[in-house]
Amino acid sequence: MAKLDAHYKGHRSRLRERFQKSGFGGFAEHEVIELLLTMAMTRSDVKPQAKMLLERFGSLRGILDAPVSELQSVKGIGEISAILLKVIRESATMYLLEASKETEVLSDPERLSNFWRMRIGHLKNEVFAVAYLDSAYRLLRNGVETLQEGTIDRAAVYPRRVVEAALNRQAAALVLAHNHPNGDVEPSEQDKMITRAVTLAAETISIRVVDHLIVSASETFSFRKAGLL
């Protein structure tokens, strides 16, 4: 037992040292998961749990996107470990949001796309959200709001609600975003109709719709890039 304890403690130390020197460069995916788990599971070898999580959910992203209850269904993963993984994911989302506040949205569409994929791309039900921007296209304080949560395949969105919320925040521009839980980010006719309706309603009060993004966990469709806005 003493030899086993010394082995995993030494392995933990080596993982931490490698991370301090070069981040996750050179790490295998299961080693990344191991390092995360050591924060919650301080007195056991976590390599078996890391490999089981990877086998069950397919990737680090799949693990971080998984609900707490599903994470806990993996042998050896308790509530604390599962919650830690969700905290890491939500912290990354908050980081992207804070970073987006420091840059012009139109100058970095990739960052905006990454933010929306992390925020709503993994959800099982369709969600419609809006980012409220100032005249320089920077996010306003508390500038992201979910306006509608739908069923597995439909979110009803009303242009008046979007416009009223923008006026209340004194926004100069908007970015619309919603997810497609089935993974296909091509816009439906309803998506196109909603985009036109919101855009027309916003234009009547001189608020610009910068873009409408449809996201999944790994893909993004931009109405502006596609010439539909």
Image (cartoon, rainbow, N blue to C red):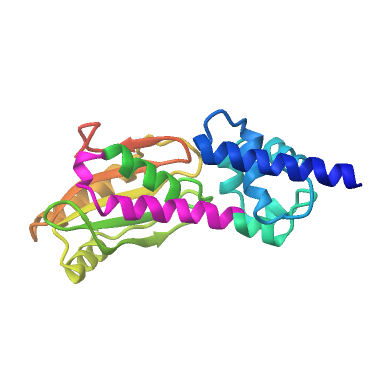
Seen at 44% across and 43% down, the residue is 180
Residue furthest to the top: 26
Figure quadrant of residue 18:
top right
Seen at 67% across and 43% down, the residue is 13
Position of residue 46 relative to residue 206, above or below, is above
Q: Is residue 14 left or right of residue 171?
A: right
Residue 58 in view of the camera? no
Where, quadrant-wise, is the C terminus in this rendering? top left
Residue 201 is situated, as x and y percent measured from the top left of the image, at 15, 57
Tell me, yes or no, whether the highlighted magenta stretch contains residue 146.
Answer: no
Residue 226 is situated, as x and y percent measured from the top left of the image, at 25, 31
Residue furthest to the bottom: 168
Tell me, yes or no, whether the highlighted magenta stretch contains residue 100.
Answer: yes
Magenta region: which residues? 85-108
Position of residue 28 relative to residue 111, above or below, is above
Closest to the observer: 24 or 1?
Answer: 1
Q: Is residue 229 left or right of residue 66?
A: left
Q: How many marks?
A: 0
Seen at 26% across and 46% down, the residue is 193
Seen at 33% across and 58% down, the residue is 157
Position of residue 204 relative to residue 193, above or below, is below
Q: Is residue 191 left or right of residue 164?
A: right
Residue 69 is situated, as x and y percent measured from the top left of the image, at 68, 57
Q: Is residue 152 left or right of residue 116?
A: right
